[in-house]
Image (spheres, grey):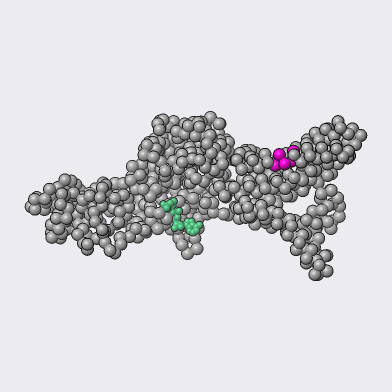
Amino acid sequence: MITVEGLTRTYGDFTAVDDVSFACRPGRVTGFLGPNGAGKTTTMRILVGLTPATRGRALIGGHTYHQLRNPARHVGVLLDAGAQHGGRTGREILTLGATAMGLPRSRVDEMLQLVSLTETEARRRLRHYSLGMKQRLGIAHALLGEPQVLVLDEPANGLDPAGIRWMRGLLKDYADRGGTVLLSSHLLHEVEQIADEMILIGHGRVVAQGDKKTLMDSHRGTRAETTHVICLDNDRLAEVLRERGVTVRPHGPGLAAECASVDVGRAAAEHQLVLTDLRAADEGGLEDLFLELTSATQREQPSAGGWAGPPAGPPPGFPPPPAPPTYGGPR
Amino acid sequence: MSHPAPPPPYQPPASTASPAATPGGPGIDLRGTASIPLARLVQVELRKALDTLASFWFVVGLAIIVVGTEVLLTIAIIVQEEPSTPGDYASVASFITGIGLPVLAIMLVTTEWSQRTAMVTFTIEPRRERVLLAKYAVCLVLTIATVLLALVLGFVCAGVCELALPDLTTWEVDWSVIAGFFITQVLAMTLGFALACLLLNTPAAIVGFFVYRLLPLLVFSAIGGFFEWFQDVQPYIDFEVAKGPLYDLSLDSAEELLQLLTSGLLWLGLPLGFGLWRILRAEVK
Ligand SMILES: Nc1ncnc2c1ncn2[C@@H]1O[C@H](COP(=O)(O)OP(=O)(O)OP(=O)(O)O)[C@@H](O)[C@H]1O
Ligand SMILES: [Mg+2]
């Protein structure tokens, strides 16, 4: 439904979007994933005709956006929920949209209800809206024209956990009914849960695409097996493993060892170390893959001084340093 | 917060039930959808021109000033027992709105940028020239409405005078004056619109609008003082002077028409052209 072919956009010497090609199919949610400044928003802006492409083309349902007559009836767009007049009420904003698209006023009430904005909230002016309320209004605006295609830039931005879950359900349901969804995010966990397919972009280039399984399979061969382990004495376990030539690095409250879990278990048993958690690192694999693929463009490079010590409390959020120095290194 | 189950967002139309085997998946069938009619765009833009707090209070303020002035004027005329016609009052109202309305025209364009609503406006109608046309049409609608309101106000004030000074009040309206005012208003609106498109910034365009009318006056008289030959050229590049015959509909020579065209092209055509070109090719953020 969405076809992007060789899309390129340069600003002077800088190439923001570099020969990007991908397709989004109906009935599927496609996640557009990449670190800050990777070119996601720029690609989407080109897709809806707000930014001219330097080269290449982007088609929606076989047409350029410009060719779609009354495009909002076919494509729901949310690029920036804050890009609305602060002096208008939420209801007024939707009413303007509905009028332009040629929809009955009742559609405004339907949409307000859909995104759980109450009547009093809808009468408030946008400048008094919270981030999440703006986002809800933006989603309502995108859905106004009953589009077959949705293009959403970081739709979960500012939504509370319940709101994120609600939106996940909404988009899944939308795709199940035959709609096409392209959504961007730099939050992998978010996309992982919603998207059927993923496009990984870094530095303006598509570095990988496909569904989760394909992505993992195609890169499994190049990646060492990793085990996540938590031990009562992490330092001692790291020492023991390193003596056996295993690369070990800190991971959350425990360690990540580049070997099979059975080897970690055996080493622990031999040295009478108590393990509280031991498992093959698979579910975190996508995150590693993502960081690996986009590492050339990642802003947070590991600092030369090394790692200060295991973080207290829960595992670090995304993104962790791609390759921290070996555990037990310079102190 | 409870989240109700979403109603069906999209029922695939019958035509897409059997997906065609095109490379990019099924296409979108455009036959069922019509373009947004221009009248609807005008309707939306008119609503946008008046539905924000800023524009609402601007219009209310302008109305208060106009009505206040007319009341004072009526009282003054009755007290001093002066003769008056409805046209007199209408001209005063038009004069005041002639300063205020172009500001509204400017805001109609610039707020799309300052409030970043252009992103939404141009995704709903990507043919930007149609949006601009609709906005210009709104300027014309507002101008017509103001001139009509000024006339109504003129007749009301004249009616009041008629009661007080039946002998001094005449009901004759000099329509050429009204027409001249209309033309002037339209030109002022167009200039505001053009500068707004060119600068895309409310304060800059408003300042520009007033500087634009004063600066040529100063510059031309200065140059004319130093170089005598300039006095022959000036009528062809001085829009303020060339506009003169329009006010009272006295434009009758080919020379005057030529002067109006050349100076108009310079002072109105160029900024409008550049402004439209800028918006049509701008990257909207
Ligand atoms: N008009 C412009 N002039 C110069 N550079 C630009 C312009 N627009 C975008 N860029 C650059 O293009 C790159 C891509 O920006 P873009 O907004 O598409 O990133 P993104 O993937 O959406 O990032 P984020 O996740 O932070 O939203 C950035 O480096 C940005 O600075
Ligand atoms: Mg972005």
Q: Is residue B148 left or right of residue A48?
A: right
Q: Can residue B84 be seen in this view?
A: no
Judge whether B7 appears above or below A203 on screen.
above
> As rendered, which of B12 and A290 lies closer to the eye?
A290
Where residue A240 appears, as percent x and y from the top left, is 13, 57
Q: Is residue B230 left or right of residue A237?
A: right
Q: In this view, does B233 lie to the left or right of A291?
A: right
Label the magenta part by its dominant secondary structure. helix
Where residue A216 appears, as percent x and y from the top left, is 28, 50
- Tell me which segment is drawn in magenta: B62-67
Magenta stretch contains residue B66: yes
Q: Which residue is drawn at 50% across and 32% down?
A: A120
Q: Is residue A65 left or right of residue B140?
A: left
Q: Is residue B285 visible?
A: yes
Magenta stretch contains residue A277: no
Q: Which residue is drawn at 61% across and 45% down?
A: B131
Quadrant of the drawing holding the N terminus of chain B: top left
Q: Quadrant of residue B213?
A: bottom right
Where residue A154 appears, as percent x and y from the top left, is 42, 46
> As rendered, which of B52 and B132 lies closer to the eye?
B52
Q: Which residue is drawn at 89% across and 32% down?
A: B166
Q: Residue furthest front?
A: B79
Q: Quadrant of residue A221?
A: bottom left
